[in-house]
């Protein structure tokens, strides 16, 4: 117990001296302490608000996603090529290669092709098959491969009427015949 008292004595002396210095600080005894605390509080609140503003700005910049066609990707230069972007196209038949933790495929559109590598943990949609429309979101790598974080598959034919069936807005050619009793 003696060691604890001996070690804490300098700490107590330091604290007592700090309190004495605080009361010797100009303005403490004359009532200016209240103004000093308000100024410190205002500066602290300003720093917090500025930090949240910077975080909001950076977050907004990171979440922006630009849509480009496959043909436009070759014309992107500088920082525009490094932004997050969405690209749409048709999946080339036979190009889907499934590996452990990765799916590679090729999107085609406007006479151009784009190799895509999907590495996210979410499974691909069931409608993602050869010759389907797909929309990928991610970044363009330095080697020209598009690294996708999200893949959305479109399948418009799934929702179209079968051949020979009337469309939703089509009217029947003749009203149904009335039954006579």
Image: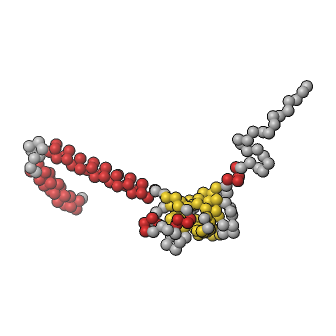
Q: Which residue is drawn at 60% across and 57% down?
A: 152
Q: Name above or below for residue 23 compared with residue 105.
A: above
Q: Quadrant of the N terminus?
A: bottom left
Report if residue 175 is visible in the image: yes
User: In percent of the image, x 50 and y 61: which residue is there?
Assistant: 85
Splitting the image into 4 quarters, where does residue 38 fall? top left
Q: Is residue 69 left or right of residue 154?
A: left
**Residue 157: percent from the left, percent from the top?**
70, 53
Residue 90: x and y, percent? 64, 62
139 sits to left or right of 52: right
Image quadrant of residue 34? top left
Is residue 136 depicted above or below 53 in this figure? Answer: below
- Residue lying at the far front in this picture: please name it: 173
Quarter of the picture holding the C terminus: top right
In this view of the protein, which residue sits in the foreground, 135 or 3? 135
Task: Determine the residue located farthest toward the top in the rendered image.
Answer: 181
Left or right: 68, with 156 as reference point: left
Q: Which of 118 and 105 is in front in this view?
A: 105
- Find residue 48 and report its horizontal and vertical position in percent: 30, 51
Seen from this angle, which residue lies furthest right?
A: 181
Tell me where residue 41 appears, x and y as whole percent: 23, 47
Residue occupying image coordinates x 50% and y 65%: 139
92 vs 49, nearest the viewer: 92
């Amino acid at each position: 117990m003696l060691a604890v008292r001996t070690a804490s004595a300098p700490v107590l002396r330091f604290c007592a001296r700090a309190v004495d210095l605080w009361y010797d600080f100009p303005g403490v005894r004359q009532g200016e302490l209240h103004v000093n605390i308000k100024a410190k509080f205002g500066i602290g609140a300003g720093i917090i608000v500025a930090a949240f503003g910077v975080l909001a700005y950076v977050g907004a910049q990171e979440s922006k996603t630009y849509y480009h066609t496959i043909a436009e990707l070759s014309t992107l230069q500088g920082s525009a090529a490094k932004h997050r972007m969405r690209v749409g196209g048709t999946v080339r038949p036979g190009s889907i290669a499934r590996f452990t933790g990765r799916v590679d495929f090729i999107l085609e559109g406007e006479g151009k092709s784009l190799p895509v590598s999907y590495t996210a943990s979410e499974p691909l949609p069931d409608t993602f098959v050869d010759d389907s429309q797909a929309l990928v979101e991610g970044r363009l790598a330095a080697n020209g491969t598009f690294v996708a974080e999200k893949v959305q598959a479109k399948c418009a034919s799934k929702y179209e009427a079968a051949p020979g069936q009337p469309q939703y807005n089509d009217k029947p050619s003749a009203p149904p015949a009335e039954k006579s009793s």
